[in-house]
Amino acid sequence: MLGGNVSKSFFQTDLSEIEKIKQEFEAALKGIKEEFDEHRESINDNTNETQANYEYLSKIDEKLNKLTERLDQVESWVSRLTGVSIKEEEEEIKITLSDKEKRVFLILYTSSQPVTYEQIGRSINENDFLVRGYLTNMLEKGIPIHKRYIDRQVYLSLDKGFKEKQAKQNILGINQTTVKEFLS
């Protein structure tokens, strides 16, 4: 009988230690999960704050553009009233784009609504990675492209003022052959 009690107490000791280790392990996992949840919440807060700041800056940019348009109208009105011409300090700008960049530009130029990387990629039969590269090159060359994030999706559009300059001055030197190739 004595041997039975020894083995019983031996197994009870092992089970209680295993139970303690299991509880410690579960407590450690719970602590790790709580830390991850805190980090995730912090990242989400930062993402929301960044998006709110971007949208706020976009609204400010829109208001500045409207203010610039109004100032141009006032200058024109004053010029007509006084008979003194206000000299434009417009310098002639010429930007050179590759054929693919021109195609991407024409998509942005002709779109009435903002477009995604995927939509541009489908239109020119390229993957999103290459489209991003073309857009980066265009930004570096001075083409003002607006990015807007909606539900974690990037929407791209061309600056309205630049669209007007392109229409009036053909800054990019896009000829009818390029347009015809784009439309076909």
Image: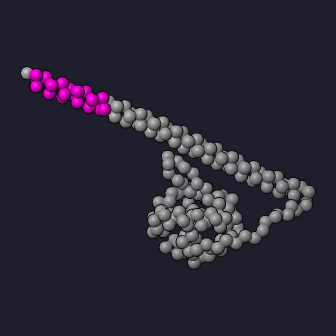
Q: Which residues are magenta?
A: 2-22
Single out the residue that lies furthest toward the front.
2
**Magenta residue check for 3:** yes
**Magenta residue check for 152:** no
Q: Is residue 20 above or below residue 92?
A: above
**Residue 36, horizontal then vertical, whole percent:** 44, 39
Among the 4 quarters of the image, the one containing residue 141? bottom right
Q: Nearer the viewer, residue 133 or 36?
A: 36
Quarter occupied by the N terminus = top left
Residue found 48% across the figure and 63% down from its top: 129
Q: Is residue 104 above or below residue 178?
A: above
Magenta stretch: dominant secondary structure = helix
Q: Is residue 132 above or below residue 68?
A: below
**Residue 156, horizontal then vertical, whole percent:** 56, 57
Could you tell whether 102 is left or right of 162 in the image? left
Residue found 14% across the figure and 27% down from its top: 7
**Residue 88, horizontal then vertical, whole percent:** 82, 63
Q: Nearer the viewer, residue 165 or 4?
A: 4
Q: Nearer the viewer, residue 50 or 181?
A: 50
Q: Is residue 32 above or below residue 80?
A: above
Q: Nearer the viewer, residue 13 or 108?
A: 13
Could you tell whether 148 is left or right of 118 in the image? right
